[in-house]
Image (cartoon, rainbow, N blue to C red):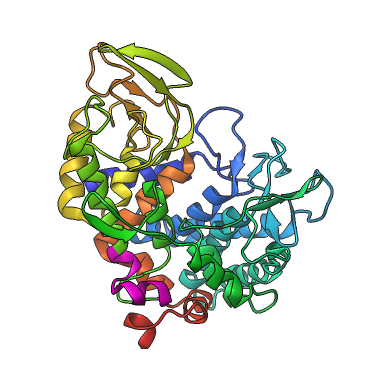
């Protein structure tokens, strides 16, 4: 089951990528722009594909080199039609020209994911071959160009993004979220490093809670407990926050996974389908915006939204990809859930593994247990599935990224110690 699921999710990056430039479509529909985070996940996935026999090393090397050359040559500057500025890139780019679309922001987290993918490629392609040498040089150059200190913009923490006209967004990385990978890479930059104060200020915003009898560093959506773990092996290493609480971020994510399952079993809002093998509340598409009366209850449904527990929003929408991405943390509860999701038909009409999200409550009475099913596949759902399945099966990526100097240096600068960092 895992082999089949991993291969199907990996195929997204083989089929939804522009071979001329390496850009990956954000969604699998005509006209979708590229997502730079999806490109970072593709760069990370190609070595996994080689290890699994999905493509050859030469094919992966060619795809990687095409991508990195293209990104290095893209225009940077303050003009609205550029692709980036100060080493950062816009969240969404035109699939052909790589120019900014949708008035989107210059994204600090999505750039970090792109750079993480480039550095993963640099670690993997370690032979003296001229093309592999060029991959390493380009990854290093892209990393060095990012001006992480600029993104602090005089504040205590890092800004989420920037736009040419309105400049820095007013939102900052505050509270536990997916940005540990960004902070680690920013701290280790040899050219424009984040200040250590920014990471300490970030830690001060964390919130320890008890949810469904699990005590852990809380964040509502499940993806927050997963994303940085794609590239960082947190087992046995701790920063100041985790030392104070006597666990590591891996154990923290295990507890968050169990809390999700317990919440679904309790099902406080009485949604259809929730149970011990049917959970996964995270950022996802949904069937809304809509309001319906179902079984006598007036329900509100949302479209794309960061859903979570226990504070919501929770409208009955579940995400199989978030379950699969939890596999390394709690396989004993994830595997039965994946089998159940397979049995209710959530792989039947999706070429790339599981459907992105579904809502049994919204689709009640339509003759299928899954109810409403999202019509599109999203790239940044596919990447975590393929990559975290591999971390569960072989530790491949975690072993690879322990050799990544920016990751190891950034963790140490952030105060992490113990485990593999002690070696």
* 193 on left or right of 264: right
Q: Which residue lies furthest to the bottom in this view?
A: 423
Could you say where residue 94 lies in the image, as x and y percent from the top left? 68, 39
Query: Residue at coordinates 49% horizontally, 52% vertically from top-left?
Result: 42
Q: Would you say 328 lies left or right of 164 here?
A: left
Question: Looking at the picture, does residue 194 appear above or below residue 172?
Answer: below
Quadrant where the image shows the N terminus: top left
Q: Nearer the viewer, residue 372 or 206?
A: 206
Q: Residue at x 48, y 27 (%)?
A: 303
Dominant secondary structure of the residues highlighted in magenta in the image? helix
Q: From this view, report whether residue 49 is shown above or below residue 370.
A: below
The boundaries of the magenta stretch are 239-251
Does residue 358 belong to the magenta stretch?
no
Specify whether residue 14 is in view: no
Say which quarter of the image contains residue 34: top right
Q: How far from the left and from the top, in percent, is residue 208? A: 36, 61
Numbered disc total: 0
Q: In which quarter of the image is the C terminus?
A: bottom left
In this view of the protein, can residue 411 be seen by the observer?
Answer: yes
Horizontal side of 72 relative to 408 (left or right) equals: right
Q: Residue at x 73, y 43 (%)?
A: 99
Q: Residue at x 62, y 37 (%)?
A: 33
Q: Nearer the viewer, residue 135 or 211?
A: 211
Q: Nearer the viewer, residue 270 or 393?
A: 270
Q: Give the image location of residue 142, x and y in percent.
A: 66, 66
Q: Nearer the viewer, residue 286 or 45?
A: 286
- In the image, residue 262 sits, relative to residue 51, either above or below, namely above
Q: Where in the figure is residue 75, as x and y percent of width and height?
A: 79, 54
């Amino acid at each position: 089951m895992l082999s089949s699921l991993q291969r199907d999710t990996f195929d997204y990056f083989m089929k939804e990528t522009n071979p001329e430039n390496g850009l990956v479509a954000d969604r699998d529909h005509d006209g979708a722009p590229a997502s730079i985070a999806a490109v970072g996940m593709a760069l990370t996935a190609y070595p996994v594909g080689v290890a699994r026999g999905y493509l050859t090393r030469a094919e992966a090397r060619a795809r990687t080199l095409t991508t990195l050359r293209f990104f290095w040559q893209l225009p940077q500057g303050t003009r609205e039609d550029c692709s980036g500025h100060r080493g950062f890139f816009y969240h969404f780019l035109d699939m052909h020209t790589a120019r900014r679309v949708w008035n989107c922001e210059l994204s600090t987290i999505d750039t970090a994911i792109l750079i993480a993918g480039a550095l993963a490629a640099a670690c993997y392609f370690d032979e003296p071959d001229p093309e592999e040498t060029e991959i390493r040089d380009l990854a290093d150059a892209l990393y060095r160009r990012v001006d992480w200190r600029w993104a602090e913009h005089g504040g205590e923490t890092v800004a989420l993004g920037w736009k040419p006209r309105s400049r820095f967004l007013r939102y900052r990385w505050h509270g536990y979220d997916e940005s540990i990978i960004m902070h680690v890479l920013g701290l280790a930059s040899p050219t424009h490093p984040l200040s250590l104060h920014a990471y300490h200020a970030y830690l001060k915003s964390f919130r320890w809670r008890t949810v469904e009898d699990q005590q852990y560093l809380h964040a509502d959506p499940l993806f927050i407990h997963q994303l940085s773990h794609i590239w960082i092996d947190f087992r046995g290493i701790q920063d100041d926050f985790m030392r104070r609480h006597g666990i590591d971020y891996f154990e923290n994510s295990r507890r968050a996974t169990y809390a999700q399952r317990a919440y679904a079993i309790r099902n406080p809002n009485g949604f259809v389908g929730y149970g011990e093998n049917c959970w996964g509340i995270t950022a996802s598409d949904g069937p809304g915006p809509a309001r319906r009366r179902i079984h006598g209850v007036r329900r509100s449904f949302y479209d794309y939204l960061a859903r979570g527990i226990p504070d919501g929003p929770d409208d009955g929408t579940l995400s199989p990809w978030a379950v699969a991405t939890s596999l390394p943390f709690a396989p004993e509860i994830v595997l039965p859930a994946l089998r159940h999701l397979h049995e209710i038909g959530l792989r039947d009409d999706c070429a790339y593994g599981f459907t992105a999200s579904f809502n049994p409550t919204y689709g009640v009475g339509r003759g299928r247990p899954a109810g409403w099913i999202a019509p599109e596949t999203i790239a940044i759902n596919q990447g975590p599935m393929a990559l975290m399945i591999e971390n569960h099966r072989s530790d491949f990526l975690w072993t690879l990224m322990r050799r990544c100097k920016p990751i190891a240096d950034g963790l140490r600068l952030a105060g992490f110690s113990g485990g593999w960092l002690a070696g």
